[in-house]
Image (cartoon, helix red, strand yellow):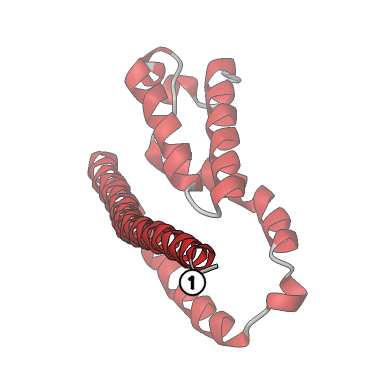
């Protein structure tokens, strides 16, 4: 998109703003998913034709803009997790070296990997994460339903026992009152 380089393009700016907004909302609400939502909105724009008509930059530039969006939300996240209280050296000492190795490696891969391959990789990873989350939700729903069914079976068993006990109590109470009547009648008859 050499013809759009250096030009102010309102639809592209608005599209990146909307993608960043939804990505940050998702991240603030769930604690993850910024890139998933951001790239989802970006792909909608690419499929809608913003690449051809308005010069929507490629995926590499979109990831750059997404990184700026993440930079903006990081102080809010650090505030919400109460960093002073929850700071852990063991996590920092494992995460920082991995970032120092992973970031340059990712840049090298990004420089030498065509955008189409990156789109396929992002799509497959996104679908994989979505399927994994759907499976976890289904498993959670299934276990809750099984617990509910066990609880219902136990409740029904308990109600049957209560009904049986109540029926036995009524039978005993009626036989007790019959016995009292016989005793009273027998006592009065002897008098």
Q: Is residue 70 left or right of residue 181?
A: right
Farthest top residue in view: 53
Badge 1: few (under 14), some or many (20 or more) residues near its Cα, within 10 Å?
few
- Residue 19 in the image: above or below residue 91: above
Left-right relation of 156 to 71: left
Residue beneath disc 1: 99
Residue 43, given in percent of the width and then of the height, sits at 37, 30
Q: Tell me residue 89's x, y (percent).
A: 62, 86
Total labels: the figure holds 1
Q: Quadrant of the C terminus?
A: bottom right
Residue 44: quarter of image: top left
The x and y percentages for residue 56 are: 44, 25
Determine the residue positioned at 28% across, 46% down: 118
Q: Nearer the viewer, residue 146 or 45?
A: 146
Name the residue located 45 percent from the left edge and 16 percent from the top edge.
54
Extreme residue in the front direction: 191
The residue located at (41%, 43%) in the rendering is: 60
**Picture quadrant of residue 77:** bottom right
Picture quadrant where residue 36 is located: top left
Most foreground residue, 125 or 16: 125
């Amino acid at each position: 998109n050499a013809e759009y380089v250096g030009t102010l393009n309102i639809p592209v700016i608005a599209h990146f703003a909307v993608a960043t907004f939804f990505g940050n909302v998702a991240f603030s609400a769930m604690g993850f998913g910024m890139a998933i939502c951001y790239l989802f909105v970006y792909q909608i724009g690419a499929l809608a034709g913003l690449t051809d008509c308005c010069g929507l930059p490629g995926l590499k530039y979109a990831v750059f803009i997404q990184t700026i969006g993440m930079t903006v939300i990081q102080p809010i996240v650090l505030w919400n997790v109460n960093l002073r209280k929850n700071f852990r050296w063991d996590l920092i000492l494992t995460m920082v070296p991995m970032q120092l190795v992973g970031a340059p490696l990712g840049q090298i891969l990004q420089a030498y990997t065509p955008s189409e391959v990156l789109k396929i990789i992002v799509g497959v990873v996104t679908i994989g994460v979505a399927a994994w989350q759907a499976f976890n939700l289904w498993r959670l729903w299934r276990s809750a339903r099984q617990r509910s069914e066990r609880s219902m079976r136990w409740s029904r068993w308990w109600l049957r026992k209560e009904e049986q006990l109540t029926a036995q109590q009524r039978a005993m109470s009626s036989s007790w009152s019959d016995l009292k009547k016989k005793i009273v009648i027998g006592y009065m008859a002897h008098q």
